[in-house]
Amino acid sequence: MELLQAIIQQGKEFKEFHRNNQIKNSKLRKAVVTYHANSERERQKTEQKNEKLRMMKLIQEDEEGYRQLLDEKKDQRLV
């Protein structure tokens, strides 16, 4: 009888262990997806901000400032 209960208990522990691992992996996957989505959104936001700044410099006829911002963008693409 004790052997049977030990086997049943081992089965429960085995099942619980793997369920907990699945939950941890699921949370980790969700965190990674969220991180990448947020970093992509921030990158796009920064690009749009820089593009608006370049356009403002161009509209204000600040050629030196515009060229400096344009050079920075080129440098970032090369990296």
Image (spheres, grey):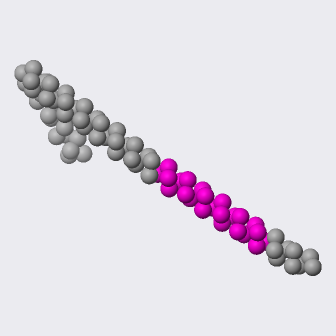
* Quadrant location of the C terminus in the rendered image: top left
Task: Give the mark count.
Answer: 0
Visible in this render: residue 78?
A: yes
- Picture coordinates of residue 33 (x, y %)? 44, 52
Residue at horizontal 21%, vertical 44%?
Answer: 77
Magenta stretch: dominant SS? helix
Residue at horizontal 9%, vertical 20%?
Answer: 60
Give the residue at the far right of this rendering.
1
Which of the two residues, 54 or 16, is positioned nearer the viewer here? 16
Q: Is residue 15 left or right of residue 57?
A: right
Q: Is residue 26 left or right of residue 2?
A: left
Q: Is residue 22 above or below residue 45?
A: below
Residue at horizontal 25%, vertical 31%?
Answer: 49
Q: Is residue 31 above or below residue 52?
A: below
- Give the magenta part as a residue range: 10-32
- Picture coordinates of residue 62 (x, y %)? 9, 21
Q: Is residue 10 left or right of residue 33?
A: right
Q: Is residue 30 left or right of residue 51?
A: right
- Picture coordinates of residue 76 (x, y %)? 23, 41
Specify whether residue 28 is painted magenta.
yes
Which of the two residues, 44 or 75, is positioned nearer the viewer here? 44
* Quadrant location of the N terminus in the rendered image: bottom right
Visible in this render: residue 64?
A: no
Image quadrant in which you'd find residue 71: top left
Residue at horizontal 82%, vertical 70%?
Answer: 9
Specify whether residue 15 is painted magenta.
yes
- Picture coordinates of residue 11 (x, y %)? 76, 73
Image quadrant in which you'd find residue 17: bottom right
